[in-house]
Each structure stands twice: as C-alpha cells, then as structure tokens.
Image: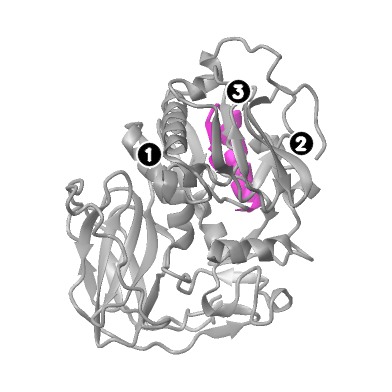
Amino acid sequence: MRKILLALVLLVASCGEPPPAAPPLTRAAPAAEPARPDVQESWRITRHGAEHEIEGYADRVSVLPGERFGLRVSTTAPRFTASAFRMGANPAKVWQSERVKGTRQAPMRLVRGTVSAAHWTPSLTVDTTGWAEGAYLIRLDASTGAQRYVPITVRSASTAGRVVIVNAVTTWQAYNLWGGRSLYKGPSGYADRSRAVSFDRPYDGTGARLFLDFEKEALAVAEASGVPLAYLTSLDLEPGTLDGARAVVSLGHDEYWSPAMRQVVTRARDRGTNLAFLGANAVYWRIAVDGRKVVCDKEDDCPLWRASKPESALVGQMYDCFPAQGVYRVTRPGHWIFAGTKGRSFPGMVGVETDRVSRGSPRDVQVLAESPFSCGGRASVTHSTYYTAPSGAGVFASGTMRWVCALRGSRCGHGVTGAAAAFTRRATTNLLTRFAAGPAGKREAPRTGSARFRGQRGL
C-alpha cells in the first residue's frame, strides 16, 4: 500500500498484430549548437490541452545516433508537428517535422491486464542522423495548441572512458497511468492494477513526468561539469555496455531493476567503475523484462531484491521510509564530495522516500550525512553514504529522493532553499569530476573510523 500512496504523491504488450506499413521518412536536421539564453526554454509545454487532444509514443526506447524510430500519435486536431529538443545544460531544438495530418487513433486495448496502443498506425518516422548522444524530448504540437512530450534517448555506442547517465525508463513505465493502469493502480485501485506494463503506449500527464521530476536537473549539472558523458537507459544495461566506463549514475527515482541490470552494474563496479545513486529506493523491485514490457506482479513473481540479495550490497544502504520530510544534516563536512560547499543543514532535502545503512551494507561504509526525522511517528534517520569496493570503485548514495529536486532550489518546494541548490550542485560536480578520473578509491587518503559503520546494521 505504501507504493499506491507514492504513486498518488508523484502524480499530486503488444497485441500481436503485424505493424502497418511505415509512413514516409522524416529526416532530421543536424544537431543544433547550444541554445542561446533567449531560446533556451523553448522546449517547454505552454498548453496541455484536453486529455486526448494530442498524445503519442516512440516505437523504440533508445536508438544509436543515425538510427530511425517511429512515432505513433493520436490527436483530435486536424494537424500536428513534432519537434526534438536535446535536454541538458543548454536545451536546444535539433529538428522539426513538417505538418502532419492528424488522426484520432483507436482506443487503447487491454491485453491480459496490460494497456496497449501497439495497434496504433505509425504517424511518421524520424531519422536521427546528425543528432548528438543524449536525452531528448519530442514535443508534439497540435494545430489546436495542445502539447505533449515523447521521450527518446540517443544512446552511446561506447561508454569507455566516460561517466554514464542512465534514464530510469523501467521506473517511468511502472508509474505510467496512461489508459488507467500502472503497476500500482487500476480503475478500482490496487486490486486490478497491471501485472505487466508496456512501452507501447504514451506516458501520462505531460508525457515526461518522471524525467522532468527526477532526472532533467541532474543531467544539466552533469553536462555543465564538463566531464565526458555517455547516455543509456535502464533497458540498455546489457553485457558489454559498461565496458571501460568510468562511472554509472543512477538518477532520482530508479526503483525497478531486472537481474540482468543489476548483474551488469555490479560487474562494472567490480572492475573499477564508480557508482552514484542520486536518489533513494533504488534497486527495490526485482522485475522481468519481456520485450517491450516490464513484468512485476508484486505478489507472485516480483519479489523485493532484499528478500534474496539486499540492494544495500550494491547501493551501500536500502529503502526505509515513506513519506519522509526533514532537514538534511552533513556530518562529515571534510569529505572530498563536500569540498567547497557551504552550510551543514538544509531544510526540506529529506524526502519523500529515504534510505539508511542496513543489513547487507558494506562493513566499511562511511556515513557522510545523518538526518534524523519522524517517519509517520516512528523515529528514523536517513544517511548519505560512501564506500570503496575492492576494485577501488567508489560508490555514493544520497539516501534521499530529493537530492535531484534540491538542484532546483526553491523551485523544488518542500521548504528547499537556494542554499540547498548551491550545496547539491557543488557536491554533485565534485562527485562527477572525481569519478570521471577512474576508480575513486585509488586516490583517497586512508580513512578514519569515526564516521563509518563497522558491521551490519538492521533496519
């Protein structure tokens, strides 16, 4: 039931038919230069419109530069256009389609409890020739003025020598209520939720809710840091994709992990790849991936990772509280991650979910921040942690889901201030810069025992 509540807080399958013939190709223009300040925000939606006035999805979650993907769009408007914006430190428009004839697609279908729009007719095909690697939002603009996003990642063919930013698409899809069903909720609540959710449908809301809430700002800070970056989605975490990577960054809400995803990231750490978890409640559900579906029954065949292999062995800590609200308190200000930061106490940064050192945490895990608060009347604490793997890889976990949100300062809400933005931006940049240089543990001074846990702690 906790996760049903979380879905409400965050909100405030193929049918087996052969696909229709592909529509005419729409070729992309070369990638644009970084946007000027006067056009930097042109990617934003200004009018949401009615519920089904325009919406759509991409037939691929990620593509390599130069590959094509299809858009399937439904709209009540006579015409629409699609525009691609590369997100990051300087969001920039890289492509726009011609005006396309609008079509009101057939209603969604329910296939064994899974909402699907796989039967929709393709609307246009996009060629990404000239697009740089990165996270993109395709904005659909109906001729009536309504707008929605469709996310797509232009992934990196190689991650060697780079810091890898991972879009948590399996978690995006788990919370996607388009068509009335997610892994948390159906028309009547939890009982008729989906046991599997499909990428063959639009995302709810703006079309990019979790990317905007939990990833966009961290991506901007990472690009502004100047470190060499690579881009993947959680579905791209396959054997070989992290070969030679300097670091892997899990963003603000990265909850749904398959065994293959975890194995690839764990093996990378064990070869010296640094890891950063800039959220909380990561590696929580042990999912299966079936083609373009995320499978997680939550009762029969989707156990929690901690039931067999606690996530703390990888992350350094594990989920403890929802809903959480509290003051973030730095307890080890001399650690290199906090070099150059100002302040030791930041209201509102603890929430809405939190982690803490727990059973399975590495024996020498260091606690960098310890923030006591009340979890629904229960005294609790959240930790920011750091440990060094035997390979020399460093692993940081923020322990709070609001780390990325705090990068926005007061725009985060919850009492977060501009001081928190300055703190998290500097700490995140320190982290990325050190991690980009290789296994962080090989460049650290010997640790003292005063700020770390010796032995495993229970919840």
Secondary structure at badge 1 equals helix
Please state which amino acid type lies under the numbered disc 1: Val
- Is 196 included in the stretch rendered in magenta? no
Please state which amino acid type lies under the numbered disc 3: Ser
Please state which amino acid type lies under the numbered disc 2: Ser
Secondary structure at badge 2 equals loop
- For the question of whether residue 176 can be seen, the reply is yes
Residue 9: percent from the left, percent from the top? 59, 62
Residue 405's place in the image compared with 389, above or below, is below
Please give the name of the residue rendered at 76% of the width and 63% of the height, measured from the top-left corner: 301
Query: Label 1: which residue?
Result: 221
Query: Label 2: which residue?
Result: 358
Query: Label 3: which residue?
Result: 391
* Left or right of 397, for residue 319: right
Residue 24: percent from the left, percent from the top? 23, 77
Label 1–label 3 contact, CB within 8 A: no
Residue 239: percent from the left, percent from the top? 54, 44
- For the question of whether residue 157 can be seen, the reply is no
Magenta segment:
256-278
Residue 152: percent from the left, percent from the top? 38, 60
Q: How far, Cα to Cα, is label 1 from label 3? A: 27 Å
* Foreground disc of the pair 2, 3: 2
- Is 268 included in the stretch rendered in magenta? yes
